[in-house]
Amino acid sequence: MSQGSPLRSCVACRSVKSKPELIRFVRLAGGKVSIDLRGRAPGRGAYLCRDPACWALARKRRTLDRALHVTVAADDWSAWGSGIL
Ligand SMILES: [Zn+2]
């Protein structure tokens, strides 16, 4: 059971998926949050499905904020939504 991609869970819907199916967010120094497209940036990370419904849920319930211990700015959500989904 040691083969295959590592599994991570979406902070919105809690489903467990392999890393390539999820988008990683990472907390940068200074408390800003960035999308980590390569999935390898250092720092605390959290994952969301590539699904607008999960992004909306995470934004509404602040599950990403809680997972990363930050407040995600509304501007960041807008920028991410138009760039990735
Ligand atoms: Zn999800």
Image: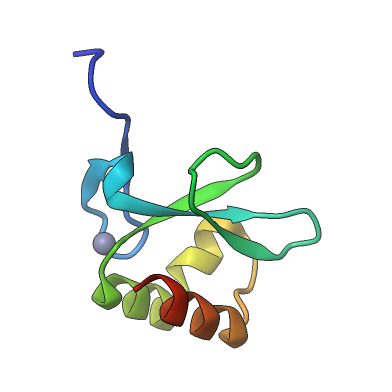
* Residue 44 in picture, x, y percent from top left: 60, 46
Q: Give the image quadrant in which the ligand numbered 1 is located.
A: bottom left
View extreme (right): residue: 30
Residue at left offset 32%, top offset 65%: 12
Q: Residue 79 vs residue 18: left or right?
A: right
Residue 76, by quadrant, is: bottom right
Above or below 2: residue 15: below
Check the picture and name the quadrant holding the N terminus.
top left
View extreme (front): residue: 83
Q: Residue 68 vs residue 10: left or right?
A: right
Residue at left offset 27%, top offset 49%: 21
Residue at left offset 62%, top offset 60%: 69
Residue 5, by quadrant, is: top left
Residue 74, by quadrant, is: bottom right
Above or below 8: residue 50: below
Check the picture and name the quadrant holding the C terminus.
bottom left
* Residue 67 in picture, x, y percent from top left: 51, 57
* Residue 46 in picture, x, y percent from top left: 47, 52
Give the camera-side residue of 70 and 26. Answer: 26
Q: Residue 70 vs residue 58: left or right?
A: right
